[in-house]
Each structure stands twice: as C-alpha cells, then as structure tokens.
Amino acid sequence: MFDSFLQGQQVLVLGGTSGLGLATAAGALRAGAQVHVGGRDPQRLADALAPLGPKASGACVDLTDEGSVQAFFASFPRVDHLVVCAANNLPARLIDGDLAALRTSLDSRFWGAVHALRAVAPRLAPEGSVVLTSGMVSQRPRPGMAMVAAAACAVESLARSLVGELAPRRINVINPGPMHTPLLERALGGQAQALQGLADLQPLKRLGQAEDFAQTALFAMGNRQLNGAVLHLDGGARWA
C-alpha cells in the first residue's frame, strides 16, 4: 500500500498531531511525500514531529480563525494534497444546551474546512486532492449530538458541491465510525473495559484503527477517478 506514489509531493495534514491525522502523516511520509502537519497545541505538535523525521514539518494553527489558517498555508506556493482531520465536537442538547457549545462543531468541523479550502485552493496542484472528515454521527445521530451531526453532514454536502469549483482537482470525504484514538480513550476515561465494550458492539467486534483511516486517506489521494465520494469507514456499524 505504502509505495512511493507520493514521491516529491507536498501533503498538508490539519489535525495531524495525534490519532487519525498523525497516522495519515506517517503514511504519506512512507509513500514518499514531504509532510507538513498542523495542530492547536504546541507541545502536542512537537511530540508528533519528533518521530516523523526530517521530511516532516509543522506549525500551530487554529482552524476556527481564518487568519491563522491563511498563515499556515502562506509558505507553501504549491500543495499536492490536503487532509483535514481536525474538529472539536462538544455534545449539547439543541433545545436547551449551551449555545457556544452548539456552535463549536460548526465552527471547527464545517467552518474549519471552509477556511482550509479557501486557503489551499490557489495553491492546489492541478492533479491535487482534498480529503475532509465527517463521522458516522451523520448517519446515526444520537440525543445531544444534533449539531455534531449537522456539521458532519454539512462537510459531506460541501465536498459534493465543490466538485465543479475545484475541478480538475478532486475532493472526497472519509466518514469514520468509532476509531481507537487518544481522543476516544479520553472520552471513555481511559478505561480498557469501556473500549472493549464499545468494540463488542461493532459488527466486526473491533474498533477502527488510525492506520485504517490512513490507508483510506492515501487511497483517496492516489485514486485519480475518486471525486465527490464519501468513504464510509465504520465496519458496517451504520447498518447494524
């Protein structure tokens, strides 16, 4: 899977300091790319860059701030592929939840994608691509997740709507189900029993791994006919 098909290409990964994004950055490096990762936390960024090696660089970026995003892209006259994994999802009930929490998902996942797309478009190579991330909540929303689901759906609709605007560049979305990442571990209080319990609920009796996401992102970068697609990476959980 990880041959040299990205040799000499520039790949940017937003949300690349842990979990899905970090695995994608590592996979792109193995495929020959120069990789630049972005994240909000300086220490987490430094920790992520250390094992990636000399072909990787990075900078802090706040996807909710258009100026910060533009500054992140400023030193790159050409980008071959952009992967956006970053999002800050805060569950809150629509009817009586905190309004700031309700806005968070749209501000980070949807408007973050918009800011990234506006910054990368003038730099994106003619054969380049963008990979956005949504989530299985778009298919199976739960109470308290209305705005998280709305943001995920909005990202998928955005990608389909931009096929014409970005052409001949490509844009696709990965829609992951439950993935075993540091973010999920924190959400479950770091309890191995809770993680196993969640895995047991899945049709394949396993959680998705960050490497599964990375393989899908690399597939989306490399397949020249894939455009406007939503790639479901949930092990069939949306049907179960």
Image: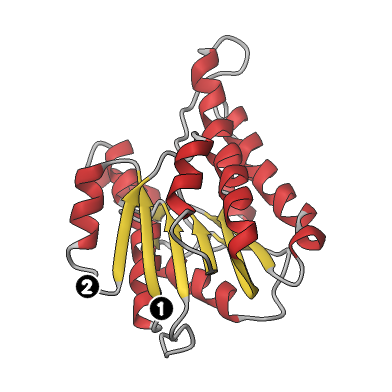
Q: Are marks 1 and 2 in contact (CB under 8 Å)?
A: no
Under circle 1, the secondary element is loop
- On screen, residue 153 versus residue 193, left or right, reads right
| Real-space CA distance between mark 1 and mark 2, rounded to the nearest whole angstrom | 12 Å
Please give the label number shown on residue 53.
Answer: 2
Helix, strand, or loop for circle 2? Answer: loop
Amino acid residing under circle 1: Ala
Q: Residue farthest to the right?
A: 164
Which disc, if any, is residue 33? 1
Amino acid type, label 2? Gly
Question: Few, some or many C-alpha atoms within 10 Å of disc 2 (few <14, some 14-19, many ≥20)?
Answer: few
Nearest to N terminus: mark 1 or mark 2: 1
- Crowding around mark 1 (Cα neighbors within 10 Å: few <14, some 14 to 19, many 20+) is many
| Residue at figure coordinates x 51%, y 46% from the top left | 70
Q: Is residue 23 above or below residue 106?
A: below
Is residue 224 left or right of 3 when viewed as pictured? right
Q: Residue at x 48, y 40 (%)?
A: 63
Kindly tell me whether residue 115 is visible in this rendering.
yes
User: Can you say whether 157 is above or below 131 in the image?
Assistant: above
Q: Residue at x 76, y 56 (%)?
A: 162
Q: Position of residue 213 (x, y in %)?
A: 46, 65
Q: Say which quadrant the C terminus sits in.
A: bottom right
Residue 217 left/right relative to 173? left
Check residue 198 in the rendering and tell me which mark sits there, or answer none: none
The foreground one among 45 and 59 is 59
User: Farthest top residue?
Assistant: 96
